[in-house]
């Protein structure tokens, strides 16, 4: 979803309606992969909360690389600290 939601920010000269159309096409493909993945994970014993937490962590990791390398935004140390706290919460969620 990162490319669908944020990829157009680098291409401000494209009309908004085209950016929306391309974003929806990209999102459709991603949803076609995410829905079966969630169903398989849920049937394998993961809870909906655990699936969502996995999704959010993966989204933030992908977005971090995307923002730095594609959008060429600076990466601050406070982002890394925030991500470490998020990983701690993921560990806590899966802790038995």
Image: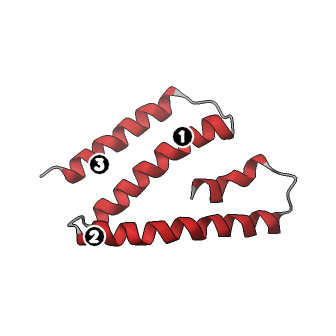
Q: How many labels does the image show?
A: 3
In front here: 39 or 14?
39
x then y, percent, for residue 60: 48, 47
Q: Residue 90 carries which label?
A: 3
The furthest residue to the left: 96
| Rendered image quadrant of residue 49 | bottom left
Does 5 sit above or below residue 38?
above
In front here: 22 or 93?
22
Choose the circle earlier in sequence order: 3 or 2. 2
The N terminus - image quarter: bottom right
- Residue lying at 31% horizontally and 69% vertically, measured from the top left: 40
Choose the circle earlier in sequence order: 3 or 1. 1
Does 5 sit above or below residue 36?
above
Q: Mark 2 points at which residue?
A: 42
x then y, percent, for residue 33: 47, 66
State the SS at label 2: helix
x then y, percent, for residue 37: 38, 66
- Residue lying at 63% horizontally and 30% vertically, measured from the top left: 74
In front here: 51 or 87?
51
x then y, percent, for residue 41: 29, 65
State the SS at label 3: helix
Q: Nearer the viewer, mark 3 or mark 2?
A: 2
Q: Mark 1 points at which residue?
A: 64
State the SS at label 1: helix
Q: Give the crowd class for mark 2: few <14, some 14-19, many >=20 residues within 10 Å.
A: some
């Amino acid at each position: 979803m990162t490319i669908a939601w944020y990829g157009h920010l680098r291409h401000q000269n494209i009309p908004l309606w085209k950016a929306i159309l391309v974003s929806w096409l990209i999102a459709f493909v991603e949803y076609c992969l995410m829905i079966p993945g969630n169903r398989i994970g849920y049937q394998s014993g993961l809870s909906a909360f655990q699936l969502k937490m996995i999704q959010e962590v993966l989204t933030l990791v992908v977005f971090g690389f995307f923002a730095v390398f594609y959008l060429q935004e600076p990466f601050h140390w406070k982002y890394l600290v925030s991500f470490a706290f998020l990983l701690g919460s993921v560990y806590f969620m899966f802790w038995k």
